[in-house]
Image: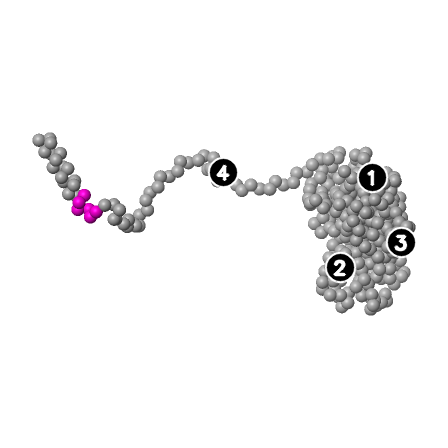
Amino acid sequence: MFVIKRLFLFLLLTGLYACGGGSSTDTKTTPTDTPQTQPEPEPNPEQEQEQEQEPEQEPEAEPVVVEGNETFTILLDSDAIKIYEIGNCGDTPGSNTSHRVYIDNSNTINGDIWNWVDNAAAAWDGISKANTAYAISRTSNANDANCSNVATYNHILVKKLGDWTNQHANGFWVTSKSDETIGQLGTVIFDMYYDSANTILPSAAAIEAAYGAGMTGEQLAAWEDSLFHLDIRVDGVEETSDNGSIYKAAYNLALTPEYADKWLRIEIPLTSFEFIRSVGYDNFTSDQATVGTKSLRAIGFVAETKNRLVYRNYDQQGFSEETTAKLFKEIGLRIKRFEITPAE
């Protein structure tokens, strides 16, 4: 009986298969609206933790105590220049003895100083203050309330915009105290305060109104940007055997308003300077290797325009000292320390 039942079941299944219409190779799959359910992957605890985390934020610059109680917070960090804001500003202790210190409480301005401003002369019509305000002091002349009453050098440097006669109305030099070449200098380290209360920067509109008739828009943009500009010049000795050439390195420091009214530490490697050969009033491009061989004479500080020119450079044929508008850049700064590291 068991055998008969199994035979019957076999015949029944064979008949059902035959009614299906052929082998699987002849069939076509009909898509349905119901997707097939895929098994969910096993949860990964590490992956879930990563998804829950907030996007990584750039860490804020941390003050770093480097000298005494002063802290230094980075404001601008590039290969060309670094600018820090000094916190707890105070007396700077003696630096590395290999650094050449040019200005501090015990190193006075020992080179040339000048002040051409003469309120009685028409050339200075429009200057904002009496000429005594632009005098250069060889020694520290103020105690700075923003820097623990440390003695500082407070100056207002002036640049004429119209005429090149006495275009640097005032300025100063510090001379080298040793027999060294420009190439032996490494990085300028400069503690200064951009004093907005004593800074007057003619606006772009004022400059265009005064000089725009004799200049193109491109010339105006290249000439001046209404920013604080301090030109730092590292001069070699005069080369009498080379037509009186003076080889120099120069850096035109530009500061935007965000740097105003702060004590700053500014570090500029010599490689970031421009290298120039000057013959009389003519300047020619030089290179670091050539300038580096020249004996250092002095380091100078003057106010500047963006490209160091004045209006008269653009309008030499039609220029008239009497009729040309008179505008002045006045930059207020306080100096606590200026030193240079040796070249590596």
Segment tinted magenta in the rendering: 17-22
Name the secondary structure under disc 3: loop
Please report whichever mark, 2 or 3, sits nearer to the chain's N-terminal start: 2
Q: Residue at x 87, y 42 (%)?
A: 176
Checking the image for residue 50, the label placed there is 4
Residue 187 or 128: which is nearer the viewer? 187
Q: The disc labelled 1 sits on which kind of residue?
A: Val
Checking the image for residue 204, the label placed there is none
The residue singled out by tag 3 in the image is: 243
Q: Is residue 150 above or below residue 135?
A: above
Residue 199: horizontal and vertical position, in percent?
78, 53
Q: The disc labelled 4 sits on which kind of residue?
A: Glu
Checking the image for residue 101, the label placed there is 1
Residue 19: horizontal and vertical position, in percent?
17, 46
Is residue 256 located in the magenta-colored stretch of the structure? no
Residue 43 or 344: which is nearer the viewer? 344
The residue singled out by tag 2 in the image is: 223
Can you tell which of label 3 and label 1 is closer to the viewer? 3
Report how far apart the C-alphas of labels 2 and 3 lie in the structure: 29 Å
Please report whichever mark, 4 or 2, sits nearer to the chain's N-terminal start: 4
Which quarter of the figure has residue 212?
bottom right
Please report whichever mark, 3 or 1, sits nearer to the chain's N-terminal start: 1
Residue 102 or 219: which is nearer the viewer? 219
Is residue 19 located in the magenta-colored stretch of the structure? yes
Report how far apart the C-alphas of labels 3 and 1 lie in the structure: 32 Å
Q: The disc labelled 2 sits on which kind of residue?
A: Trp
Please report whichever mark, 1 or 4, sits nearer to the chain's N-terminal start: 4
Q: Is residue 256 left or right of residue 244?
A: left
10 Å neighbourhood of mark 4: few (<14), some, or many (≥20)? few
Quarter of the picture containing the C terminus is: top right
Q: Residue at x 46, y 37 (%)?
A: 48
Residue at the farthest right position: 240
